[in-house]
Image (cartoon, rainbow, N blue to C red):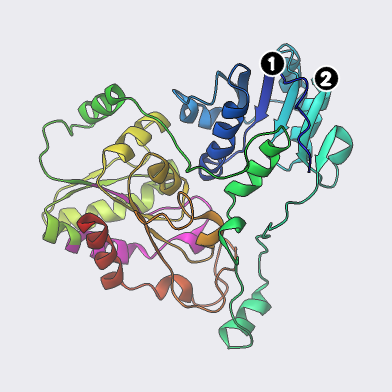
Amino acid sequence: MQPIAESNPPRRILVRGVNWLGDAVMTTPAMMRLRERFPGARIALLTPEKLEGLWRNHPAVDGVIAFKAGDSFLSTSRRLRAGNFDVALLFPNSPRSALEAWLARIPMRIGYARPWRTGFLTQPIPTRPGHARMRKRSAAEIRGLAAGAANRTAASDAASHQVHEYLHLAAALGANPEPVPPQLFVAAGEIEEARNKFALAGITNPVFGLNPGAEFGPAKRWPVERFIAAAQEIQRRTHCLWLILGGKGDAGIAGRVESAFQAQGAVVKNLAGRTSLRELCALLKSCRVVLTNDSGPMHAAAALGTPVVALFGSTDPRLTGPGLPGDSRHRLLQSDAPCSPCFRRECPIDFRCMNGIGVARVIEAVLEVLGS
């Protein structure tokens, strides 16, 4: 595929961002390559309001256009039209993202060719070579695999990782498609403010992050009892302070972890649902290690330079693992369940993918990360 912006580089670029925290982090390599390709262009990001804070201080972005969940595509397109953009680069595959750019009269509109949207694009991009589809398995297929009817199938190499989907789109504008690690940025002052706000200033114990939730669904959550057992034993060995992190939807799980620690007379800080996105990033940056399910905070921690120990069940780390494939700072744990990855929100059988990850194995992985 030939780049399409060699002779007349755009001066005002709109990037339509994705809708979930983890996915947004995985777009940062493409954003940085786009900035590298067009250092003098103004790059604006259209993003859900809930993710606006993620892009603060990010060198790839000059401005953020945030929209609320209830905003209509007509109101959004009117706001975009006022920006006089030369190019729209659309990361989501939705018809709406293409329609908004078309209604905004942006002359060049680039995105993947998909049903109900290709007609709104000026440069529809075919599916990327090496693309690995995240196909949800049927309940019948899962039962067959669990019974030994076939072997696990998964992504074959590092080029299957989701970061390449976004890099391939940026390459249509002449950007370098070679991956760089996902990166987020928080200032030292933000870390200090967060530590002061949540009474962490002056604590000499090592601070670890614990993220027992996952917004996608229960199939991505290691059993909370095992999180508790692993975290308590790690605290016994390291004298760490655990920060329980997550969103408002994780409050129930986080409360169970907090109660279990309190019952043992141990100290833990439950901050799930109490932080802004910027504060969450500042706290993740200040942790020595983060123990987590496959989730948005997992991706954010890795992009901030914090090692993670991440547990994968229904999803595939070769597609959506933290950082870039092969990053030696992280430990990605899976069981050998033949039905994994199934990409389902809930397990239709016995949850063997997550139940197959033992507490001792997780403790060992965390201690190994600390030792390295």
Q: Which mark is residue 11?
A: 1
Q: Quadrant of residue 30?
A: top right
Q: Quadrant of residue 88?
A: top right
Upstream in sequence: badge 1 or badge 2? 1
* Few, some or many residues within 10 Å of mark 1 (<14, 14–19, 20+): some
Residue 158, image x and y in percent? 55, 59
Q: Taking 324 as reference, is 109 above or below it?
A: above
The residue closer to the viewer here, 60 or 20, is: 60
Residue 16, image x and y in percent? 66, 31
Q: Which mark is residue 101?
A: none
Give amino acid for label 1.
Arg
In the image, is 129 to the left or to the right of 322? right
- The residue range painted magenta reads 208-233
**Quarter of the image that includes the N terminus:** top right
Residue 192, image x and y in percent? 23, 26
Residue 220 inside the magenta-drawn segment: yes
Q: Which residue is mark 2?
A: 105
Residue 270, image x and y in percent? 27, 44
